[in-house]
Image (spheres, helix red, strand yellow):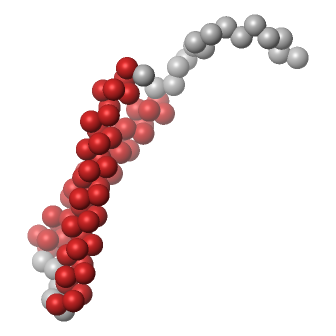
Amino acid sequence: MQSLRVLLPALWAGVLLSVLGLGFGVAQWVHSVTTGRPASSGTVMLAALPLMIGIQFLIAFLHHDVDNVPREPLSADDRDPE
């Protein structure tokens, strides 16, 4: 549980960046559709980069969480394995 505390900022940063990037991208896409003008490449990258970095944070968090499985049981199992 202690290693999870270290990674919580990565989880929150991943969620925040993903939501902001997706929200900005959708807002700019709707604006582009309503005005009929295509979005510039800078606007597309401004939406895509936070989304990609946020997804990378989430992948790193999940990788560490899955990789950090206890190797030894926390308590002894006294039952018979029949």
Q: Quadrant of residue 60?
A: top left
40 or 20: nearer the viewer: 20
Q: In this view, does 72 lie to the left or right of 58?
A: right
Residue 64 seen anywhere in this rendered image of the structure: yes
Q: In this view, does 68 lie above or below 55?
A: above
- Using the rendered view, name the quadrant where residue 64 is placed: top left
Q: Image point 27% across, 36% down: which residue?
A: 9
Instruction: Classify residue 31 by image quadrant.
Output: bottom left
**Residue placed farthest to the bottom in the image?**
36
The total of numbered circles placed on residues is 0
Q: In which quarter of the image is the C terminus?
A: top right
Q: Is residue 57 left or right of residue 77?
A: left
Q: Where is residue 12 in the image (x, y as percent from the top left)?
A: 29, 42
Percent of width and height locating residue 41: 14, 73
Q: Where is residue 43 in the image (x, y as percent from the top left)?
A: 14, 71
Question: In the image, what residue occupies the spot 24% across and 78% down?
Answer: 29
Q: In this view, does 80 lie above or below 34?
A: above
**In this view, which residue lies farthest toward the right?**
82
* Rendered position, 76 above or below 10: above
Q: Where is residue 32 in the image (x, y as percent from the top left)?
A: 19, 84
The N terminus: image quadrant: top left
Q: Is residue 52 visible?
A: no
